[in-house]
Image (cartoon, grey):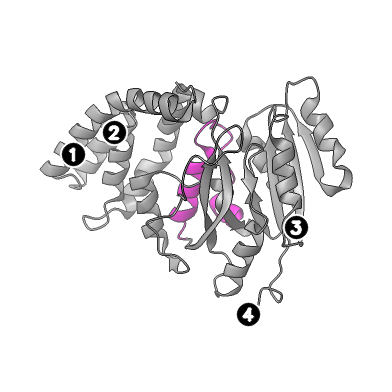
Amino acid sequence: MKCEEFSPLVSIIIPVYNGSNYMREAIDSALAQTYKNIEIIVVNDGSCDNGATDAIAREYGDKVRYFCKENGGVSTALNMGIRNMNGEYFSWLSHDDVYTPDKVEKAVEALSKIEDKRAIVCCECVHIDKNSNLISSATNTTTIEKDELVLWDAVLLKMLREGTMNGCALLIHKAVFDDAGMFDETLRFNQDSFMWNKIFLKGYSMLSIPHICVKGRIHDKQLTQTGQAIFRDDCKKMSEFLIPELLKVSTKEKNFIYEYIKYNAKYKNTEVVKTAYIKAKEKKLISFSAFVNIAILRIYGVIRPLIRKMYYSMFRNIKTS
């Protein structure tokens, strides 16, 4: 099937909070898409910038669909966009990130070649700084086979071992949210990784494409650089759902709960590690060597923030907590 024959409406949703510094660049990159069957939805999540965000969004007139709401966090903004989208597919664009012109086209083209139209499509990303200078090479799905449909379990193990993927790199069928649920509005930091975990636990496959289509901006004002306390609180909330779900699908051959424990040990989520460890031990999913690895990672979790802070300060000129 050619891409011209498969041309679903794609909704690009841009959640914004105090986004006047970068949002023009984001919106312009959405408008510049070579794939034309799109709608662009901008959701102003209660910006407190004396109307600057509102003024910029309204400059685009009917080129974008604009919604304004009280501040509730990115999850609430994304959910508002999803509830109001006309498109068959959802594509997230953070207000400080940028799409390449062929982002949507490459994803739709990849979907046109496979039968499973509800597979999650994921492209590669690079990182840019506050001045749009490149600061990293391609990253997102480097250990996933490209142009092949990868089953849910392989994707989930990849995320648990290597961390989550950039949500702006994904193309998701709207029906997936009907099945897996919407973004959790109680989360302020980890709403994206929790959503992807829920989706792949529902058994959805992923199609990874070898194209760099997203430029993710790193700067010292974004929550990922300042909200570590929120991150830990979110991880604890997520664990109430994830621990029992991961235990259900874990075996000694595919030990999701063990990978989950290691991930949380690395990020110093002590309570999550203790709870998950006890449950996994009851199911006989933790060996002595696994116990040793977890202990080492807990030590690493203590010194990792210091290493990260020094790295970002010295090599990226970014202040981070």
Identify the residue shown where x is 56% and y is 34%.
129
Quick check: marks 1 and 2 in contact, CB under 8 Å? no
Residue under pointer 1: 293
Q: Residues within 10 Å of mark 4 (few under 14, many from 20)?
A: few
- Identify the secondary structure beneath mark 4: loop
**Which of marks 2 and 3 precedes in the sequence?**
3
Residue placed furthest toward the left: 288
Residue under pointer 4: 1
Q: Position of residue 161 (x, y in %)?
A: 33, 47
Residue under pointer 3: 38
- Identify the secondary structure beneath mark 1: helix
Q: Residues within 10 Å of mark 1 (few under 14, many from 20)?
A: few
Residue 178 on the magenta segment: yes
Q: CA distance from mark 1 to mark 4?
A: 48 Å
For the N terminus, the quadrant is bottom right
**Which of marks 4 and 3 precedes in the sequence?**
4
Q: Position of residue 89 (x, y in %)?
A: 66, 58
Q: CA distance from mark 3 to mark 4?
A: 20 Å
Which segment did they paint magenta? 176-203
